[in-house]
Image (cartoon, coloured by chain):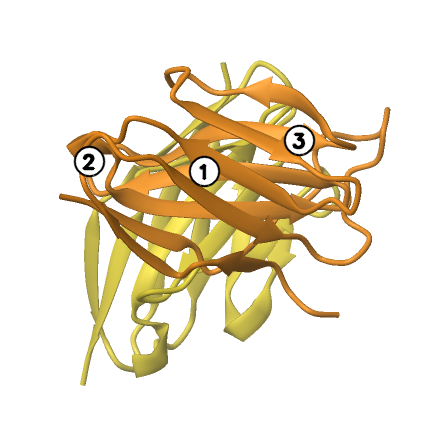
Chain colours: A orange, B yellow
Amino acid sequence: KAGVTQTPRYLIKTRGQQVTLSCSPISGHRSVSWYQQTPGQGLQFLFEYFSETQRNKGNFPGRFSGRQFSNSRSEMNVSTLELGDSALYLCASSPRVAGGSHYNEQFFGPGTRLTVL
Amino acid sequence: AQSVTQLGSHVSVSEGALVLLRCNYSSSVPPYLFWYVQYPNQGLQLLLKYTSAATLVKGINGFEAEFKKSETSFHLTKPSAHMSDAAEYFCAVSTPYALNFGKGTSLLVTP
């Protein structure tokens, strides 16, 4: 099976712009999670989508949003970019099933490196 | 809340030496614990996971970890380090909706 893919791999934006990142999960995985990784804060959970519905959200401002499509592909959007949004954004998919265990392992993509100037 | 703490942000070992990366957890329920590895410019790769079965868990690339409830620990070990093991290692605990990661330990392997 193909792994989790993320596009683009690298992005450079300026403050105030918005950005959209894309994630294609492993075939058959319906759960997609997003994480932000920075040197200072480490890995932080952004949100999780399951069957096109946001199930859970981390402690991030409303500028961070996402969505999931019927084919389980997911996008996240960051509006009004700030310098502090520079980070590696990781997408992870999981074979978690509806009503099933939450404790399935997550499979990570290579990430999108966002630089805000 | 479930959390993990990784002791030591940097660990340096000689090639062929024992690798020991420390992780302690805090959880009010039986935890599900994971070790991930991240190579430069890559995502996270699962090394191994503990899901309340055997306390000694064997993973990929010769790594293993032992769950010790009495010590609330889940340390990662490898008997003999290879140069290719140089990477960032993350311990994580599963919450109902996400993984909570430790801050990571950077492993340096010297010839």
The residue nearer to you, when weighing B105 against B78, is B105
Q: Which mark is first along the chain, 1 or 3? A: 1
Classify 10 Å Cα crowding around label 1: few (below 14), some (14-19), many (20 and above): many
Q: Which mark is first along the chain, 2 or 1? A: 1
Q: What number is the disc on residue B90?
A: none
Q: Which mark is first along the chain, 2 or 3? A: 2
Helix, strand or loop for disc 2: loop
Give the answer, above or below, for where B67 lies relative to B93.
Answer: below
Q: Mark 2 points at which residue?
A: A40
Q: Which residue is drawn at 73% across and 31% down?
A: A50
Q: What number is the disc on residue A49?
A: 3
Residue type at tag 1: Tyr
Helix, strand or loop for disc 3: strand
Q: Mark 1 points at which residue?
A: A35
Residue type at tag 2: Gly
Give the answer, above or below, for where A115 lies relative to B61.
Answer: above
**Mark 1 belongs to chain:** A
